[in-house]
Image: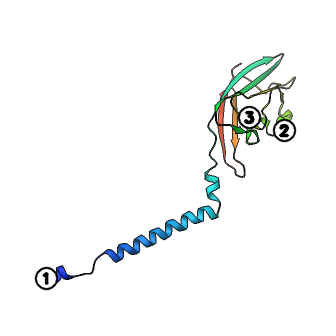
Amino acid sequence: MNLKQLFQDDDAVSPVIGVILMVAITVILAAVIGTFVLGLGDRVSQASPNANFAFDYTTVGNNDAVNITHDGGDGVPSSQVNVSVDGANAWGPGTGAISGNNFQSGGSSWSDKITAGDTLSIKEQSGTDPVQDGMTVKVIWSADGSDKTAVIGESEVSL
């Protein structure tokens, strides 16, 4: 073996590493540009709000009522919120209490943006009983322009 030739050989691995780095940079740039061109970056930024809700259950006359108060955290546009009682839609944006599911307004309601201290009150319509002990009340957030939803408040009915 000729040791002199070993130290004079200029061929190295650097051209291979250079090609690999160029391909990697091209793939990363294509992914970033593709994400923004296709609008996927907008959907990623719509994370569910971090809000806290307090639930209070009362009886008004013969009708049970659910009072939901925003206790703190992020403000939530009311147009993105639904309230369900044991799977039945009880309150929706723009419609208020859902009378077809035996609910009516209990006096207070949420306006454009739900912030700390805002209270929603819904109660049973006379002669119905859609709210009973052990049922689950959920505040459900839905992202605008997408099918993404998240439960941001949940409680079990205790009358």
**Figure quadrant of residue 101:** top right
Q: Which mark is residue 4?
A: 1
Classify residue 89 as left or right of residue 70.
right
Amino acid type, callout 3: Ser
Q: CA distance from mark 2 to mark 1?
A: 88 Å
**Figure quadrant of residue 33:** bottom right
Amino acid type, callout 1: Lys
Classify residue 29 as left or right of residue 39.
left
- Residue where numbered disc 3 is placed: 84
Nearer-N-terminus badge (1/3):
1
Instruction: Identify the element where label 2 is drawn.
Output: loop
| Circles 2 and 1 in contact, beta carbons < 8 Å | no
Residue 21, given in percent of the width and then of the height, sits at 41, 70
Q: CA distance from mark 2 to mark 3?
A: 14 Å
Residue 130, given in percent of the width and then of the height, sits at 79, 27
Q: Nearer the viewer, mark 1 or mark 3?
A: 1
For the residue pair 120 and 114, the one nearer the viewer reads as 114
Q: CA distance from mark 1 to mark 3?
A: 83 Å
Q: Is residue 141 above or below residue 105?
A: below
- Residue where numbered disc 2 is placed: 95
